[in-house]
Amino acid sequence: MKIIVTGGYGQLGRAFVALADSFAGQMFFFSSCDLNVTIPYQVNRLFNQIRPDVVIHTGAYTAVDAAETAQDEAFRVNVAGTRNIAAACLNHDSKMVYLSSDYVFDGKQNLPYTEFDQPNPINVYGRSKLEGELIAARICPRLFIIRTSWLYGEGRNFVRTILKLAQERKELTVVNDQIGTPTYTADLAQGIMSIIETGEFGTYHMSNNGYCTWYDFAKEILRLAGLSTGVQPITTSEFAATALRPRYSVLRNYMLELSGGDYFRCWQDALADYINRDR
């Protein structure tokens, strides 16, 4: 089996790099510098060269706040780029994995979102990811849509930011009125590798189990790292971000539950593993 991973040097892409040595087939990793997914000729040329069985499309415009003033760029990458990947997958009969987000939901409900709940994004980034889902589904029949949340792994992320700030400041302030699920990219990559072996195409939620606020997350990071830096909770309005965020965006891995395949561990165990490995 030959697999192309776009966004190959982002957080999730690096998790697939870590799996490559133990993978029986071949994996090919491409960053946005190697492959501009918004240019159809580049995408088609790559597919003709490699003829992939599977494409894991992790490459995306992910700057949530910047997207509010760069809507065209967010849609160019997340929608037009996804269209190009989906069309190439259709032409080569390749399976496609499209990475989406908890931010396709508005956060107005108080129960974890399943794959059957109606998306209603409240920011530009979320709208671009939802449109990416829709355009991929219209074009590519052999499609897995994977929604996930609050990713951390290799590279820049919330965990490393908190650990860095804890070394520089006596006290941190962290938002305490947004609820979601931190997800370790190593766990997500394993989940995706398991599902692509099947022909059970469709939309799947894949996140670690449980939920917390960003404040809870920060407290657990510091506890596991053995740091005594103080943390004060603040509201989203006090943080003054450009883009709106859903108040509650917990995902339930319902389709995995129905198939008996939800092996995702709780977020606290995954975080402990990550921090221990990162030391």
Image (cartoon, rainbow, N blue to C red):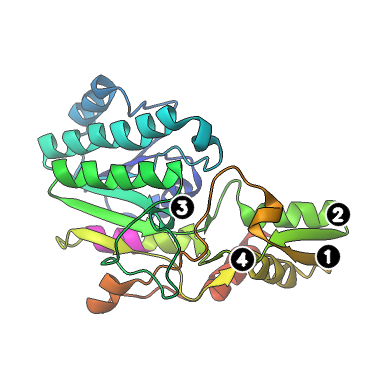
* Residue name at image x 40 percent, y 68 percent: 251
Q: Are marks 1 and 4 in contact (CB under 8 Å)?
A: no
Q: What is the number of the mark on residue 177?
A: 4
Magenta span covers which residues?
A: 191-196
- At mark 3, the secondary structure is helix
At which x and y percent is residue 175?
Answer: 67, 61
- Relative to 66, does residue 106 appear above or below in the rendering? below
Q: Residues within 10 Å of mark 2 (few under 14, many from 20)?
A: few
Residue ID for mark 2:
169
Label 4, label 2: how far apart the Cα atoms are = 23 Å
Q: Closer to us: mark 1 or mark 4?
A: 4
Residue ID for mark 1:
229
Pick whichever, 73 or 28, lies toward us: 73
Q: Closer to us: mark 4 or mark 2?
A: 4
- Relative to 189, does residue 60 appear above or below in the rendering? above
Quadrant holding the C terminus: bottom right
| Precedes in sequence: disc 3 or disc 1 | 3
At which x and y percent is residue 53?
Answer: 19, 45
Pick whichever, 204 or 67, lies toward us: 67
Tell me if residue 31 can be seen: no
> Tag 3: residue type?
Ala
Q: What is the number of the mark on residue 15?
A: 3
> Tag 4: residue type?
Asp
Q: Closer to us: mark 3 or mark 2?
A: 2
Q: What is the number of the mark on residue 268?
A: none
| Precedes in sequence: disc 4 or disc 3 | 3
User: Magenta region's main secondary structure?
Assistant: helix
Q: Residue 194: say if magenta.
A: yes
Picture quadrant where residue 77 is located: top left
